[in-house]
Image (cartoon, rainbow, N blue to C red):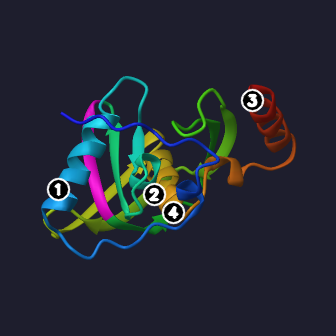
Amino acid sequence: MTIRSIRELGDPVLRTPADEVRAFDRELAALVRDLEETVDHPGRAGLAAPQIGVSARVFALNIDGVIQSLVNPRIVELSADTQDGDEGCLSIPGIWAPTVRAMSAVVEGFDVHGEPRRLAGTGLMGRALQHEVDHLDGRVFLDRLAGEARKAALRALRERV
């Protein structure tokens, strides 16, 4: 069992778009296993490869105790209706802020063997899918904040140091 350490904001890997996975091999299988084992803890909803220092378009989710992963994901559908709830991130510990996301999301990619896979969800699942794809694009949830929510989150981040 390999539980990997989580990179925190300030690490350049979190701000760099992740590389597309080209080989569905043992190395990828080991990465997926590490992601799934690392996300398999209370309070952890999702984890993208850059968060453990690997530039690969892969994430794992842990929603309601169901752990699943997706390789080379892309969002193919977002609902017009939105949710505005507190969001946090393992790479930005202790900071939570109201973040607007689509209520539902559909993401397509591949499983660890290269077979097409589609994940869809509403509420927390929809939020997690969007959050993890953002990580793979070099974005963190703070980038989605505006106005007072952004100011408060950045203030809290500065005070943490």
Q: Residue at x 39, y 50 (%)?
A: 121
On the image, the x and y values in percent for residue 59 come to: 36, 53
On the image, the x and y values in percent for residue 75 come to: 45, 67
Q: Kindly identify the amino acid type of the residue bearing the numbered disc 1.
A: Ala
Q: Main secondary structure of the magenta part?
A: strand
Count residues near mark 2 (Cα–Cα under 10 Å), then give few for <14, some for 14-19, many for 20+: many
On the image, the x and y values in percent for residue 152 come to: 82, 34
Q: Earlier in the sequence, mark 4 or mark 3?
A: 4
Q: Kindly identify the amino acid type of the residue bearing the numbered disc 3.
A: Val
Closer to the observer: label 1 or label 4?
Answer: 1
Instruction: List the residue tagged with mark 4.
Output: 78
Tag shown at residue 105: 2
Instruction: List the residue tagged with mark 1.
Output: 29
Q: Earlier in the sequence, mark 4 or mark 2?
A: 4
On the image, the x and y values in percent for residue 134 come to: 53, 58
Instruction: List the residue tagged with mark 3.
Output: 161
Task: Magenta stretch: give its range.
Answer: 65-71
